[in-house]
Image (cartoon, grey):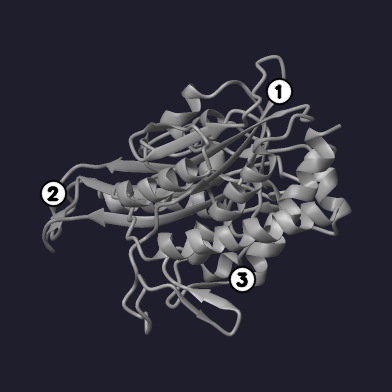
Amino acid sequence: MVNALENIQTLSKEAIALLKSLIETPSFSKEEEHTAKLIADFFTEKNIPFQTKKNNLWAFNRYFDESKPTVLLNSHHDTVKPNKSWTLDPFKAIEQDGKLFGLGSNDAGGCLVSLIATFCYFYDRTDLTYNVAIATTAEEEISGKEGLEIVAPELPEIAFAIVGEPTEMHLAVAEKGLLVLDCTAKGISGHAAREEGDNAIYKALKDIQWIKTHQFPKVSPTLGPIKMSVTIINAGTQHNVVPDACTFTIDVRVTDQYTLEEVIEEIRSNIQSEVAPRSIRLRPSSIPMEHPIVQEGLKLGRNAYGSPTTSDQALLDCPSLKMGPGHSGRSHSADEFIYLHEIEEGISQYIQMLEGVVTR
């Protein structure tokens, strides 16, 4: 037990050092090649073979056995761009009062290095009943197509996954999917001073009112109801011309009670406007409450909840649990930080949970 504790403490120090290097290496989405190299160098120093594709890296435990199921540990190393409210240098890792400041420290650097440390803890183990894989991926912040989406086909079948996002190490057992729908109401143009034309704005307003008030009948026990919001609207070219088209965009947060296709069909059958989905990639995800990894987390006093935000979980076709050190409210904020103790505790809790599943 003492050796295991010492091992975790060493891994925590290494994880924090890696995080500091990642903070000081800009890695905006689609520009992650330098942080990818940092992670590659870290694995090389640990004598851990890895594979790469674009700015993504993945690796497997030393004694990988095709006859065993595989658990995937995943988080991202891209960041958003810093906003103008930063008072600190976003690309300088500043340690102060038990906090580590820097862009990406909380979202999702702390999660990423904690999962890398957890993978290293299990890497040489010969007593595993599961294989353990790690995937450090790109483009999560823009829901890009050259991140986890191109890594997933390279992996074996995944029994379940842990996706690292800041949840204070609580258990996000379900996550809403995302649909972005571009809609067009069509009318007939005419002179605004005469009774001419068919105003597309008025048609759009009727549809928008339906969107505002409609309730999908099935409500998720963990995620609640589907939420629809009209977020963009455009119409008209000049004040005296009745517009013949009005476009608007709907942000739809979909629960595990419906497929994206079912939601699209429900909307199309109830509004006049044409509906064009931008993508049907970002699907709702969940893991059963009775799943062993969830039960291990509950034993540690963690809470289970449904997450309204979308992550790379949406790209995985397996049961997945979103959890990690850090607080979601700090993500994308000025002077972003993570507490050092959150990383240390995160590594310990990840390991304890997986010990209860992968060594039985």
Give the residue at mark 2: 190
160 displayed left or right of 353: left
The residue shown at (61%, 54%) is: 114
Q: Which mark is residue 340?
A: 3
Q: Amino acid at mark 2?
A: Gly
Foreground tag (1 vs 2): 1
Question: x, y percentage for residue 216?
Answer: 63, 42
Secondary structure of the residue carrying tag 3 is helix
* For marks 1 and 2 on the same chain, the one whose residue lies earlier in the sequence: 1
Residue 135 visible, this orientation: yes
The answer for how far apart the CA atoms under marks 3 and 1 are is 33 Å
For disc 1, the marked residue is 69
Pick whichever of labels 3 and 2 is earlier in the sequence: 2
> In this picture, is 83 found above or below 42?
below
Crowding at label 3, few (<14), some or many (≥20) Cα neighbours within 10 Å? many
| Count of numbered circles in the view | 3
Q: Which residue sits at x=59%, y=39%?
A: 284
Quarter holding residue 54: top left
- In this rendering, does residue 170 appear at all? no
Q: Is residue 45 above or below residue 50?
A: below
Check disc 2: other Cα within 10 Å, few if <14, some if 14-19, many if 20+. some
Q: Rate crowding at label 1 as few (under 14), some (14 to 19) or many (20 or more) other CA atoms within 10 Å.
A: some
Q: CA distance from mark 1 to mark 2?
A: 65 Å
